[in-house]
Amino acid sequence: MVQAYILIQTEVGKASTVAEVVGEIPGVTRAEDVTGPYDVIVRAEADTVDDLGRMVVARIQHVEGITRTLTCPVVHL
């Protein structure tokens, strides 16, 4: 299982809606509005890195109101 945090920037006033929509995507375990340089932080998981990439590119980045994403895979050192 691969886990990641996905940091999302949104259009002005869209953070709440984006968090709600992204939170319904299969594989997303949590989506929350935050303040700072990013507007939404998502915790997601997938079986493989490729599956995680497909989730981000094919599902999350297509949500209306998202302007940029940054995916941060969780590592266990």
Image (tube, grey):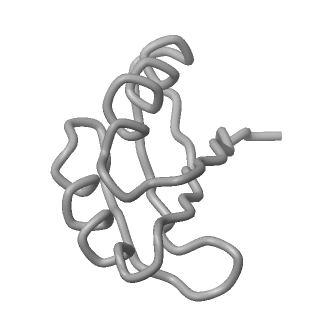
Residue in view at x 59 percent, y 50 percent: 68
State which quadrant residue 16 falls in: bottom left
Is 76 placed left or right of 66 in the picture?
A: right
Tell me what residue is drawn at x 73 percent, y 40 percent. Answer: 76
Q: Name the one closer to the observer, 20 or 68.
A: 68
Q: Position of residue 34 (x, y in %)?
A: 51, 83
| Number of numbered discs on residues | 0
Residue 40 spot, x, y in % from top left? 47, 69
Q: Which is nearer the eye, 63 or 7?
A: 63
Residue at 59 percent of width and 58 percent of height? 7
On screen, residue 33 above or below 62: below
Instruction: Indicate left or right for 45 with 72 as reference.
Output: left
Residue occupying the far bottom of the picture: 35
Which residue of the protein is positioned furthest toward the front in this rendering?
12
Q: Is residue 57 above or below residue 10?
A: above
Looking at the rendered image, the quarter that the C terminus falls into is: top right
Q: Position of residue 32 (x, y in %)?
A: 38, 74
In the rendered view, would you say 23 is above or below 12? Answer: above
46 versus 4 height, above or below? above
The x and y percentages for residue 11 are 46, 68
- At 54% from the left and 59% from the top, the residue drawn is 8
Residue farthest toward the left in the current orientation of the protein: 24
The image quarter in which residue 26 lies: top left
